[in-house]
Amino acid sequence: MKYAKPIVRILLSITLLVAFILACIHMPKQRCERISVVAHAQNESVTLSQKDVESLLSSAKIEILGKEVKEVDLGEISTLLKANPYISNVNFVHFAGKKLVIDYTLKQIVLHVFTPNGEHYFVDNEGTVVPFTAKMQDYLMIVNGNIPDKHTSGKKAPKKVQEALSLTRKINENDFYQAQFRQIYLNSQGEMELSTAVGGQTILFGNMDDADQKLRNLKTVYENGLSHKGYNTYAQLDARYKNRIIATRK
């Protein structure tokens, strides 16, 4: 009896090995029955859905459904997806039985930029230009004003837009800032101006020097000053000076 358990284990291992080998032999002969797309997104909106992916594959004349597993070029699919402007990373493309699983991570879109000539585009958290799509319906910081018209999808956004992105990152880290500041205007001096959700003031912010302190000063003014005097009391707040805010009445 002392040999019974080891023999059972050996037989079980052999059975599993045989099953695995048979599966490996027969799997390439199986035909793909469906496609499953998994999109990971930090934005609430999904800029590239399963339907979009199926359309991309169709446009590239890549046939999958009904094809034998061995006939599907997974590398070709991965290359196609990596070239898409809304995808940050293709995590994997593989078969799970008769199902093709496509798993990717979408870019985190942060800015909606409007150029003087009427064009508009997005910028992701890495500072890369992303084409506009109506699928993106999240609240985004708007950037407009004196912005170079020239931009290329997949390339870095203009320098001044990069500065606006740096400020937006700081704003998005704080719930108060995020609720209060809605738009960044780049004026003719190359400085940033903020538009607010409450009070309608124009805030002269300048550049990114002492940005954290400027934001803290503005928060103090809103919480301890304007909340008592009235949010509509002032037309402009100048935050460009160290440790003070200069207010201009309406």
Image (cartoon, rainbow, N blue to C red):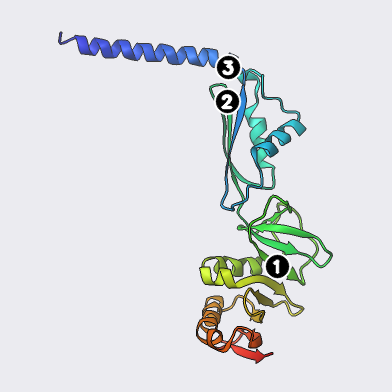
Gap between marks 2 and 3 measured at Cα: 12 Å
Q: Nearer the viewer, mark 3 or mark 1?
A: 1
Quadrant of the drawing holding the C terminus: bottom right
Q: Percent from the top left, x then y, of residue 107?
A: 62, 50
Amino acid found under the numbered disc labelled 2 = Lys
Residue 81 falls in image quadrant: top right
Earlier in the chain: of badge 2 and badge 3, it is 3
| Label 2 CA crowd tier, 10 Å (few <14, some 14–19, many 20+) | some
Gap between marks 3 and 1 measured at Cα: 51 Å
Q: Percent from the top left, x then y, of residue 62?
A: 72, 28
The extreme left residue here reads 2
Earlier in the chain: of badge 3 and badge 1, it is 3
What residue is pinned by disc 1?
143
Amino acid found under the numbered disc labelled 1 = Val
Secondary structure, mark 3, is helix
Residue 65 falls in image quadrant: top right
Q: Percent from the top left, x then y, of residue 230?
A: 59, 86
Q: Nearer the viewer, residue 195 or 151?
A: 195
Are the two marked residues, 1 and 2, in contact with CB atoms closer than 8 angstroms?
A: no
Amino acid found under the numbered disc labelled 3 = Pro
| Label 3 CA crowd tier, 10 Å (few <14, some 14–19, many 20+) | some
Taking 201 as reference, is 149 above or below it? above
Earlier in the chain: of badge 1 and badge 2, it is 2
Disc marking residue 28 = 3
Disc marking residue 99 = 2
